[in-house]
Image (cartoon, helix red, strand yellow):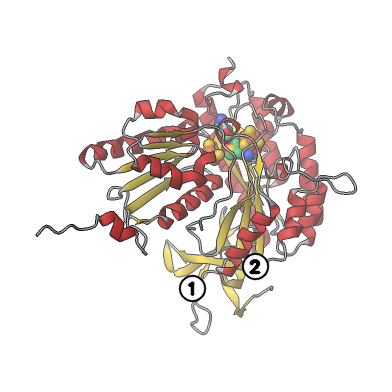
Amino acid sequence: MITTHPPQLGIATVGAKKNRGTYWITTFGCQMNKADSERMAGILENIGYSKAIDELSADLVLYNTCTIRDSAEQKVYSYLGRQAIRKHKSPHLKLIVSGCVAQQEGEALLRRVPEIDLVMGPQHVNRLETLLEQVDNGQQILATHENHILEDLTKARRDSKVSGWVNIIYGCNERCTYCVVPSVRGKEQSRAPEAIKQEISILALNGYKEVTLLGQNIDAYGRDLPGFTKEGRREHTLTDLLYYIHDVKGIERIRFATSHPRYFTKRLIDACHHLPKVCEHFHIPFQSGDNQVLREMSRGYTIEKYKKIIGEIKDKMPYASISADAIVGFPGETDQQYEKTLDLIREIEFDLVNTAAYSARPNTPAANWPNQVDEFVKISRLNELNNLVGIVAKKRNMRYLNQTEEILVEGINTKDSNQVMGRTRTNRLTFFQSCDSQGNEFKPGDLVSVKIKKIRSFSLTGSPSKTNQININ
Ligand code: SAH
Ligand code: SF4
Ligand code: F3S
């Protein structure tokens, strides 16, 4: 007698999720990419993939890439080379490239590494399931066309259990002459306030204490949404959104990044000052301390305007931390112009400055200018700048010494398991012993009063000054 067995696929999909094997995601680049990766991990787990123990054993490998500088772009090619060799031995391996290199290179990436199954731009993140179905049908897929980003209904698989990223606006409509982001992330698309609040409420229900609202130019939030107030103001702005989400119970800290000096408003400063959950930390890149360079970068503000914004913040919140990004070696930057960047850092006393040597990027105006700065000059400027940033940050950190700070515990200090690590409201990394005086261990999500005993340039060490944990709800 001949017996027939239902195919494996049928058994596995009835009632239970099909086990599709393991996945691995490596994320390059900014917080936006990290948030995208968490959503893609959520989608993969939802359709039956589980997290692999390492990259070389995974059945599906996804590289979520960054192209902000040439060095970031080149990194991914060496990773891909390794996986392409593996695919020849294990043809079932699915190889996916997403993110900004995927968008920039598109078809060229498939030609360069034909082993890739799927190349998908940042606007296609929430479509991963559909795109994978096409891959499963044996197709090689390119998804880089302009796409309206639909709400993602899958629960993101987040790395942190305490602090969640929440995209509020995708893309960027600016045209900074050095920057590749507008061409790879596309036009601004704001999410509806209701969808944002719902995501934050779900985070709170799952025990999250902190959210960071994300956008490349977060001050542009709402520009593309309909509606005006009676006074003729846009109905949806970042400031209004902060008021709207502030009452989500369980969320105790609200952050946002990245601010653009061109659009930063006094109303926003007032909201940050008034709303207790909004943390006293502002990330406002200035890029250069020289007006001529700023003009050539098409940044749309002067150093005077930038200083005015910082002055207004410091007037209201002297304790606030200010961080920024700066570029050295932009085409044509002279020694004197570069010195002005150093002067600004000394004057403002930034808590942190992310620094970079200018890197010529595809499809950006400045890349074709003839007055490129010598590599050696760029690197020596960058080294000097980094040194100054460390000195200034340490000086600025003096204000914490012997003060009691509220720290949100994120986890164990990976370098010393007797300590936990967390952040001040001003976003300074802080370490302290992992138990209180009665031997109770601090857990991720605890808010603890910590007396700061030691400062370094970019982190603090203290000891818990109270056994009671703070609860501001
Ligand atoms: N939207 C943010 C920045 C996004 S990119 C803003 O407007 O400030 C993050 C940082 O990378 C930038 O602030 C800039 O300092 C740096 N960066 C961008 N393009 C660069 C390039 N071509 N070379 C070097 N650094 C660059
Ligand atoms: Fe790039 Fe300028 Fe947009 Fe920032 S604002 S992402 S630097 S183009
Ligand atoms: Fe990089 Fe794209 Fe972010 S280029 S910095 S990952 S927006």
Please name the residue that numbered disc 1 is placed on: 434
Residue 451 position by quadrant: bottom right
Q: Quadrant of ligand 1?
A: top right
How many other residues sit within 10 Å of disc 1, few (<14), some (14-19) or many (≥20)? many
- In the picture as drawn, the residue positioned furthest to the left comes out as 1
Compute the Cα span from label 2 to label 1: 16 Å
Along the line of sight, which residue is nearer the eye, 233 or 8?
A: 8
Residue depicted at 55% across the width and 46% down the height:
32
Residue depicted at 55% across the width and 51% down the height:
152
Element type at mark 1? loop
Please name the residue that numbered disc 2 is placed on: 405
Image quarter of the N terminus: bottom left
Along the line of sight, which residue is nearer the eye, 420 or 387?
A: 420
Q: Is residue 359 above or below residue 86?
A: above
Residue depicted at 70% across the width and 57% down the height:
280
Residue type, numbered disc 1? Ser
Along the line of sight, which residue is nearer the eye, 334 or 128?
A: 128
Element type at mark 2? strand
Q: Is residue 198 above or below residue 347?
A: below
Image quarter of the C terminus: bottom right
